[in-house]
Amino acid sequence: MTTPLTLHPHRALPADPAVRDIAVRIYEQVAGLPLISMHGHVEAQAFAENTPFADPAQLLIVPDHYVTRMLASQGISYDALGLARSDGGAVETDSRKIWRTFCENWKLYRGTPSRYWIEHELVEVFDVHEMPSAESADRIYDQIAAVVASDDFRPQQLLDRFDIEIISTTDPATSDLAFHASIAEQGLGERVVPTFRPDAVFQIGGPAWTREIDDLAAVSGIDTGDFSGFLDAIRERRRAFVAAGARASDHGHLRADTTPMDPADAAALYARVRAGERPSREEAFAFEAHMLFMTAEMSCEDGLVMQIHPGVLRDHHSGVLETYGKDKGYDIPVPVDYARGVQPMLDRFGRDPRFHCILFTIDETVYSRELAPIAGTYPSVRLGAPWWFLDSPDGMRRFRELATETAGFFNMSGFVDDTRAFASIPARHDLSRRVDAGYLANLVAEHRLGEDEATEVAIDLSTTLPRAAYPPIAH
């Protein structure tokens, strides 16, 4: 006998009945609001070509590092999960077998946000009503495959089905934005927008940096032979992104440092590396810091909101990186010094009304000590929603408890998700709205907020604040 799969209407809401009743009333006011997905990673190509999604394993397991890293932690090889090898070596290609492996190990996800999201997807998106297991695996696979094969389950159609008001893609500085041009031609240009991600051209010590700079020159039409040309090329690409509807830039460096270099020193370092010299580790960090400072200056010029999310030591295992490539679950959070790191940038631009910055973190130790005080005083700064390892029920609650008292609600971006797993977007927003409803209900129960105020805040966190944090740019 298989175990039925149902979603409790009060999941992730407070356990105390009196507080839960308040939370239910608050949640009901936000449950049906549209989704603002402004920190997304669904590929622009998917929207432009509107091609059907692949089978259940290729949709829900293989590309999701949350899912695969848990299985890997229990000794299941990436080969068995169908992750492509850089050397072209053989891996499992039978998606049904990959799906069975996942279902046989469903218990591994107990207590994790992955379980919450996947259960929501199974029930609400795919109409599955039995728990994953070895016995139910094939039936669930067939049910999901039938839904995925439907013409109503294509990327463009899901915008309406999921009630996504606007979604961003994240695109490298070297993107020619051709997919976004196609999206605009199909009438979705104001609903699917790009985000400018220049990390690869800022990371001067990276193994592919020279190729990235050459690609930047080709797409911008500007010679990047010297530092001045490089800056001109960056500005040109930012203009192209703004013209394509972009509202933000995105920066995922290891450090939060924004200390500017002497312009002559930056130009000299650029020239040396362009000529083939390898920079030291500290030189590379210094260049990245300088470019974050320069990005803030450019943001004042063109209006792109600057998103910074440092503090992740990426590709922690060199063997996995070499064998399977980047972003395979071996990314580990590290401490971040925000107070000193962003001080140079905020000292120069923090009170400039043209500058807007959103700070994200997965270093919980800085919530109340650094980030909340920064956002609570600099008018240019908003706190981004908990993301990556913290977009979880308890992670979101801790964020609210530690940051709200100092920063307030209105110095936050609201929830904007952070995923390339398209089918999980509604689940992630739903979880955020439930957690916020619970936190606000507790304030009401303690007579710290009126219920009408709490409901208004819940609506603001769901829609008003995300819209305000990422305003459209006139062009």
Image (tube, grey):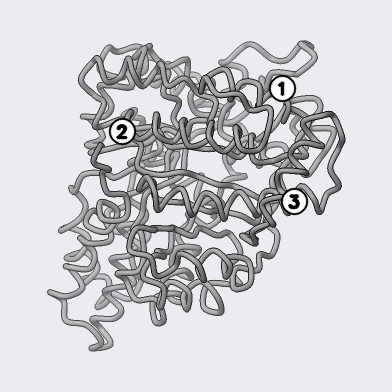
Helix or strand or loop: what does disc 1 sit on? loop
Q: Which residue has dot 1 on it?
A: 80
Task: Sort mark 2 into few (<14), some (14-19) or many (20+) by Cα contacts within 10 Å.
Answer: many
Q: Position of residue 354 (x, y in %)?
A: 34, 58
Task: Sort mark 1 into few (<14), some (14-19) or many (20+) by Cα contacts within 10 Å.
Answer: some
Helix or strand or loop: what does disc 3 sit on? helix
Res 154 label: none
CB-based contact (under 8 Å), mark 3 and mark 1: no
Residue at x-position 68% and y-position 52%: 254
Give the answer, above or below, for where 28 lies relative to 188: below
Residue at x-position 32% and y-position 14%: 182
| Amino acid type, mark 2 | Gly
| Amino acid type, mark 1 | Ala
Q: Which residue has dot 2 on it?
A: 245
CB-based contact (under 8 Å), mark 3 and mark 2: no
Q: Quadrant of the C terminus?
A: top left
| Amino acid type, mark 3 | Asp
Helix or strand or loop: what does disc 2 sit on? loop
> Going by the image, does 439 lie left or right of 70?
left
Q: Which residue has dot 3 on it?
A: 265
> Going by the image, does 187 lie left or right of 97?
left
First reached walking from the N terminus: tag 3 or tag 2: 2
- Rounded to the nearest angstrom, the CA distance separating label 3 from label 1 is 49 Å
> Going by the image, does 309 lie left or right of 421?
right
**Residue 442 seen by the camera:** yes
Q: Position of residue 443 (x, y in %)?
A: 29, 81
First reached walking from the N terminus: tag 3 or tag 1: 1
- Rounded to the nearest angstrom, the CA distance separating label 3 from label 2 is 34 Å
